[in-house]
């Protein structure tokens, strides 16, 4: 069961957008199924008389993102609630949501619904191209920055050697920075390192991008709505919850381990035709506690 609560309500609702699992799926010993109850909450402007609710591109991406978490929670099937839906390893939980965002910027998809609210004209293709180009601006630097933050996080939580902050940061800095100067007080001011649930897992953001870009490239090759690819995606990523190790699910979906080249191609860093050079990096994972937080 899926409930959507899309409009802002300053009196009754906090800001932001999130998915929540009010009740997880399960199957009891007699084979009786309990269906999950899933919500998507956003804060879009309510329509007024004569004026529809007009969403920005970012808001549409959020709609698809939370929809992806929603599918993950709603399509799940399995015996144990604690292993269903979004009860997965932390570095896997944003794959089903971020993956959905890819469809938003596809011209074929946009033309189905992104029309001018007065004239009915579809969004011009050159606007879409500009949006994609703008999105890729500084992608190399941003990618290094996220990687660097993920590595600093792991360095702190995996560090067994006594040392100064500078010594810990310098090791990471040597791997990821193209500027000669260390950024100032990164460990002290980056809140995710020791708070907010992403400690020893901040890399999850970038890792989810690697996974979803890789899977989406499969759709780009087979067709955005290809039935066989969609079915495979549903049966692996969206229905197995935490019953199977994420890497095994990914391999079931793709027939191989993840490869970051698809992400680099999407960001314009690798050319579309460059041969694959990367092998999958090894990653640490941590378990998401049952009844974890809402997913943003
Ligand atoms: Zn999310």
Image (tube, grey):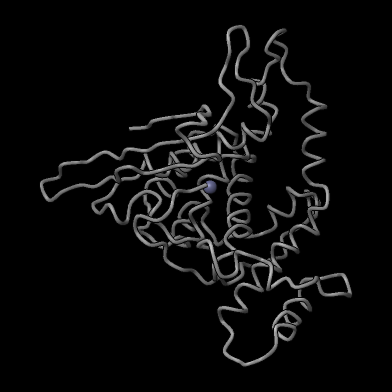
> Nearest the camera: 183 or 111?
183
32 displayed left or right of 291: left
Q: Residue at x 45, y 33 (%)?
A: 12
As displayed, is residue 247 above or below residue 128?
Answer: below
> Nearest the camera: 41 or 34?
41
Q: Which quarter of the figure is the N terminus placed in?
A: top left
Q: Position of residue 157 (x, y in %)?
A: 56, 78
> Nearest the camera: 59 or 122?
59
65 displayed left or right of 122: left
227 displayed left or right of 152: left
Which image quadrant for residue 102?
A: top right
Q: Residue at x 76, y 81 (%)?
A: 170
Q: Residue at x 62, y 7 (%)?
A: 50
Q: Residue furthest bottom?
A: 162
Which image quadrant for residue 89?
A: bottom left
Q: Residue furthest front?
A: 11
As displayed, is residue 200 above or below residue 165?
Answer: above
Q: Position of residue 254 (x, y in %)?
A: 53, 53
Q: Position of residue 46 (x, y in %)?
A: 56, 21
Q: Position of residue 48 (x, y in %)?
A: 58, 13
Which image quadrant for residue 31?
A: top left
As displayed, is residue 65 above or below residue 188?
Answer: above
Q: Residue at x 79, y 79 (%)?
A: 174
């Amino acid at each position: 069961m899926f409930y959507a609560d899309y409009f802002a309500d300053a009196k009754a609702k906090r800001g932001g957008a999130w998915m929540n699992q009010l009740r997880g799926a399960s199957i009891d010993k007699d084979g009786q199924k309990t269906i999950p109850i899933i919500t998507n909450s956003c804060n879009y402007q309510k329509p007024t008389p004569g004026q529809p609710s007009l969403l920005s591109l970012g808001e549409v991406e959020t709609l698809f993102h939370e929809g992806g978490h929603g599918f993950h929670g709603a399509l799940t099937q399995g015996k144990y609630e604690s292993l269903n839906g979004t009860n997965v390893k932390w570095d896997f939980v944003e794959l089903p949501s971020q993956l959905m965002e890819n469809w938003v910027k596809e011209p074929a998809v946009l033309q189905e619904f992104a029309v001018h609210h007065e004239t009915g004209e579809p969004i011009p293709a050159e606007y879409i191209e500009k949006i994609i180009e703008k999105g890729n601006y500084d992608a190399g630097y941003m990618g290094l920055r996220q990687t660097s933050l993920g590595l600093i996080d792991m360095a702190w939580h995996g560090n067994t050697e006594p040392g100064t902050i500078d010594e810990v940061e310098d090791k990471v800095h040597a791997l990821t920075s193209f500027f000669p100067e260390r950024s100032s007080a990164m460990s002290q001011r980056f809140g995710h390192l020791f708070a907010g649930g992403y400690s020893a897992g901040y890399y999850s953001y970038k890792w989810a991008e690697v996974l979803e870009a890789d899977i989406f490239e499969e759709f780009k090759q087979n067709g955005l709505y290809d039935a066989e690819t969609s079915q495979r995606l549903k049966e692996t990523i969206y229905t197995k919850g935490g019953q199977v190790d994420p890497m095994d699910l990914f391999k079931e979906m793709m027939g191989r381990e993840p490869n970051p080249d698809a992400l680099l191609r999407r960001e314009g860093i690798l050319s579309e035709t460059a041969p694959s050079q990367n092998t999958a990096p090894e990653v640490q994972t941590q378990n998401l506690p049952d009844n974890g937080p809402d997913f943003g």
